[in-house]
Structure formats: C-alpha cells, structure tokens
C-alpha cells in the first residue's frame, strides 16, 4: 500500500510540474510576429513594439515566422490560444497572410500590420507601411546621380510574394528609365537575403564584368552584393540599398555602399502598438486603415545620425 501511495504521489507531482511548465495564459498580452531577427530591420520592429507594449502595461509574446506562411498560421493560432488582446504582424506574404489575419479576426483578436501590406482591406484593423514608392524614387535619384546618369547596372529584387518588392522596383524604374544612357544588364531576385545577394552578384559579375552599379531592393541584399564585389576586387561599382540598417550605415561611412533609404521601422512598430492599445481600451480604430510613412535618403552626408532605423536631429 505504501509503495502504491508513493507512486501515486510521484505521478501527481509529475503532472503538476507538467502543468506549471506550460505557457501561461496572460490576461494582458500583445503578440508580436515578424520575419527572422537575423535581418536587423525585423529585429528593430520587434524591439520597438515590445518596448512600447511594456511601457503601456502589456505582457508580450515575440515570435518569428521566417517568411513561412504555414508557420505564421501556427503562430497566430498560438497567439489566439494564449488569449492575446492584439497581434502586431509583419506578415509572410500579401496573399498567404489574408486567411491567417482573418482567422485572428474571427477569434476576436485584432491584427495591426506593419511594413508589409496584404491584398485585402477590412481584415486587419490597420496597415502601417513605409512609403516604398517614395523611398524608391529617392534611392533611384541618388543612384542616377552617383552613376553620372549613365552606365550598365544590375537590380537585385526582393521576394516575389512581397508587394514591397514590386513597389520598390517600380519606383526605381520610374526614375532610372528616364535616363537613356542607364542600361540594366541583369535583374534577379535575391529574396531579401544577404547570402543570395552574394551568390547572385558573383554569378552576375561573371556574365557582366563591365557593370558600374547595383541597386538593391533592401540592405541585406546590398550587403551581400558589396561583399561579392569587394571579394572580386571591384571597389569601383556603386551600390545603393533600401532600409537604413546600421550595417549599411557603417558601410557608407567606410566608403563601401554609397547610399540607402531609411524606413522608420522602429517608429512604425511603436505606432502599431499605440493603435492596438487605443483599440483594446476604447474600441477606437485609426481614421484610415492604411497609413504611409515617408522614407529618408541616407548617404555620406547624414549616415552618422542613423541609429537603429531612426535619424537623430
């Protein structure tokens, strides 16, 4: 009998330990879901959102979907299951994310999107994005100026499923195509990746050794491109990026990459949390679902003022 009683107590203790080890249900939780923090842009979003949420008295659940639509859907299930009051989301694709955001809405969990739009309205409470077209035009104007309005160049595109990739490319070409002596000799997707930016640049350079410039859809691809060019001894090639990362700031200051365009990632994430707080506490929605925030050109003249996707005065 004593042995049986002891075994029962051990089993009860194990069950209790398993229960207490499970994730707690937070009564005042905001979920923050972004792509991988390996990209400093997405890390800045998560840091900014988490800081603002905690300032406003919320607990946070910070998750990463790695640009995988299925994983994103599972993470939204997790947020719903944990009783999140709101989701701050930099989504995994303009089409694939619609169902996931709708699922959250149907469960009574409002979503506040940052950085990337979805191809639907009325599903998320708000969509706060950088003015990618305006920013791309700024970057393209600087690129053309640096190139002396002529020469062979390469464009590295972002992920095809991301609306921002197409918007930025259009912004670039609406400026560059007005200069007949600017000739694009290659246009390839490097999927926002530094590794792919490096490998694609190596391949392009072998086929087109006479290039004078590279314009990239984001900073991570630009960093891959400049590394490949430097490895090939091509310090003469002008590289321009888009995002405004500290890595590119440092490259600009050391004479590598020539310019980028800063997106206010940190400010966007904090604004989304403020909107979520207003909605949670008062039911008030922003006046417009979609809000554009202008970008800022970063070059050698102001790079020293750049810190974590914000520009000091």
Image (cartoon, rainbow, N blue to C red):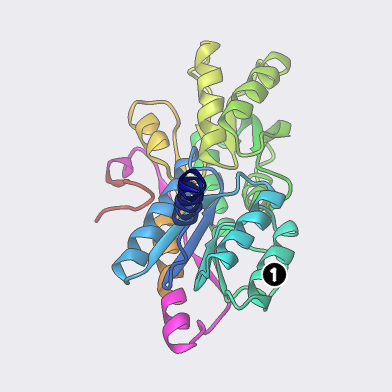
Q: Residue furthest left?
A: 313
Residue 215, percent from left and from top: 58, 36
Numbered disc 1: secondary structure: helix
Q: Which residues are magenta?
A: 276-304
Q: For the point 51% across and 21% down, which residue is it?
A: 227
Of residue 122 and residue 141, the one placed in the foreground of this image is: 122
Q: Please tell me in which quadrant of the rendered image residue 54 appears.
A: bottom left
Quarter of the image where the C terminus is located: bottom left
Query: Horizontally, is 305 left or right of 283 in the view?
Result: left
Q: For the point 56% across and 26% down, which residue is it?
A: 225
Q: Note whether 42 is above or below 97 in the view shown.
A: above
Q: Note whether 41 is above or below 20 in the view shown.
A: above
Pointer 1 local density, CA inside 10 Å: few below 14, some 14–19, many at least 20: some
Residue 258, percent from left and from top: 44, 33
Question: Looking at the image, can residue 148 be seen?
Answer: no
Of residue 36 and residue 108, the one placed in the foreground of this image is: 108
Question: Looking at the image, can residue 188 be seen?
Answer: yes
Residue 206, percent from left and from top: 69, 14
Q: For the point 61% across and 33% down, which residue is it?
A: 150
Q: Residue furthest front?
A: 1
Disc 1 marks which residue? 103
Q: Note whether 39 is above or below 167 in the view shown.
A: above
Inspect the magenta stretch and tell me whether residue 287 lies in it: yes
Of residue 224 and residue 100, the one placed in the foreground of this image is: 100
Residue 281, percent from left and from top: 42, 84
């Amino acid at each position: 009998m004593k042995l049986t009683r002891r075994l029962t107590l051990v089993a009860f203790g194990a069950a209790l330990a398993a229960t207490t080890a499970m994730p707690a249900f937070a009564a005042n939780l905001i979920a923050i879901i972004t792509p991988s923090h390996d990209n400093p842009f997405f890390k800045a979003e998560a840091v900014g959102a988490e800081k603002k949420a905690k300032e406003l008295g919320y607990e946070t659940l910070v998750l990463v979907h790695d640009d995988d639509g299925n994983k994103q859907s599972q993470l939204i299930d997790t947020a719903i299951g944990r009783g999140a009051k709101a989701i701050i989301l930099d989504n995994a694709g303009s089409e694939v994310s619609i169902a996931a955001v709708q699922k959250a809405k149907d469960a009574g969990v409002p979503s506040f999107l940052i950085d990337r739009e979805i191809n639907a309205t009325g599903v998320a409470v708000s969509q706060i994005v950088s003015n990618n077209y305006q920013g791309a035009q700024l970057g393209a104007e600087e690129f053309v100026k640096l190139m002396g309005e002529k020469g062979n160049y390469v464009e590295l595109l972002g992920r095809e499923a991301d609306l921002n990739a197409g918007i930025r490319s259009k912004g670039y070409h609406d400026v560059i195509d007005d200069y007949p002596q600017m000739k694009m000799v290659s246009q390839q997707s490097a999927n926002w990746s530094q590794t792919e930016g490096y490998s694609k640049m190596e391949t392009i350079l072998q086929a087109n050794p006479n290039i004078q410039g590279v314009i990239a859809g984001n900073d991570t691809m630009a960093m891959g491109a400049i590394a490949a060019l430097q490895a090939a001894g091509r310090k003469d090639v002008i590289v321009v990026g888009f995002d405004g990362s500290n890595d590119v700031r440092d490259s600009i200051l050391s004479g590598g990459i020539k310019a980028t365009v800063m997106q206010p990632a940190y400010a966007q994430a904090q604004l989304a949390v403020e909107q979520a707080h207003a909605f949670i506490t008062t039911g008030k929605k922003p006046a417009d679902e979609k809000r554009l925030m202008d970008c800022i050109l970063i070059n050698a003249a102001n790079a020293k003022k750049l810190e974590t996707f914000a520009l000091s005065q």
